[in-house]
Image (cartoon, rainbow, N blue to C red):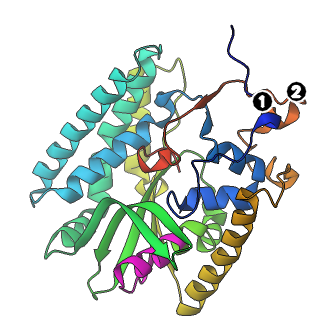
Amino acid sequence: MKNKKLNLYDLSIPNDYNLKSIGITQGLLYTWTDCRIKFLLAINRLRLKKSPVNTMFGTLFHAGLETMYKTNVKSFTEMFNLMKNSVIDEIEKEQRNLNSLTIEEELWDKWLISCSIMFPKYFEFYKKEILRIKSNKNILEVEEIFEANFNCNYKRVGKIDLIFKDIRGDIWIEDHKTKSRIDLFNMQQVLSIDLQGLFYCTSIENLKLIEIKGFIHDIIRKPEIKIGESILVFKSKLKNKIEKDPSHYFKKIKCVYSDTEKRLFNSDVKKKIVDIELFLNNKLHWYKNQTSCMKTFPCDHLNLCLNSSGYLINYKKIETFFPELEDKNEN
């Protein structure tokens, strides 16, 4: 007997998900505000099948940065060597997980070359800041998963890339983002109202009872890869571009939040949680949110909504509700 095809219109609220024991991440909260169909898919742990090669660059960069910040060495050369080793380990892990996939060797080679060129340039660009943060115990957390309970009604869950003290003693949360599509003209405005910064800052303040000054978006531009371009030409072009204008590839945007902003954000989340609870108890229906279908980039689930049959083609059921806490993809 063949397995029954999954259908969007047969989905229901899963019994194993709730806000108190499982919690909600910033990504899932954003999904709720964006589109209830996407939220329903997420809590049913249904994801589109994607090749790991698409997230290789982000995985490698995060692995390297984690190693750098977690080690006690102060030598810049030693830090970089340790980071390279962690990257190699991460690559081997990825390759072991690709047992049934065929990925062009060209892509692997070019991502490796991209990291080998961009790692030292990133460190050179931020060397003074990195060495200062690593000194005098200024690092408070690196790649740590948190769970913050709010009034016993729900809990927020997330993964922090870095929490550190600056030269004035102010505490910051920094998040590393590898992106290929960047609109720097609008990014400052967009990130200043982004949910992630306020979600993380208010969650950590609630959990650790400390004051967070703000949130830093550490943006690393993912280089463009052209299939068919020779390895030597690709390497030469990328190296020349970064040397000519490193700020095109590395950008940090700071967002400082006032007490009023934090209070209003917490109040807004509380209202959203009330609506989500109603939804989980089948007292609010789900529907298509057409305004989220075609933004700057089309929704990943657009084909599903355009398909009147509702069949979930190219979807898979995953084990965890929050895969973003395990793997660092392009944010």
Tell me, yes or no, if residue 295 can be seen here: no
Across and down, in percent, residue 183 comes to: 63, 56
State the residue in front, 30 or 55.
30
Is 130 in the magenta?
Answer: no
Identify the amino acid type marked 2: Ser
Residue beneath label 2, please? Answer: 309
Image depth: mark 1 or mark 2 in front: 1
Specify start and end residues of the magenta stretch as a single range: 199-214
Q: Dot 1: few (<14), some (14–19), or many (≥20) neighbours within 10 Å?
A: few
Q: Residue at 28% of width from left, 88% of height from top?
A: 168
**Horizontal side of residue 205 vs 315, given as left or right:** left
Across and down, in percent, residue 65 comes to: 29, 52
Q: Which element carries disc 2, helix, strand or loop?
A: loop
Residue beneath label 1, please? Answer: 7
Q: In which quarter of the image is the N terminus?
A: top right
Q: Residue at 51% of width from left, 49% of height from top?
A: 322
Q: Nearer the N terminus, badge 1 or badge 2? A: 1
Task: Mark 1 and mark 2 in contact? Answer it, CB < 8 Å.
Answer: yes
Across and down, in percent, residue 110 comes to: 41, 27
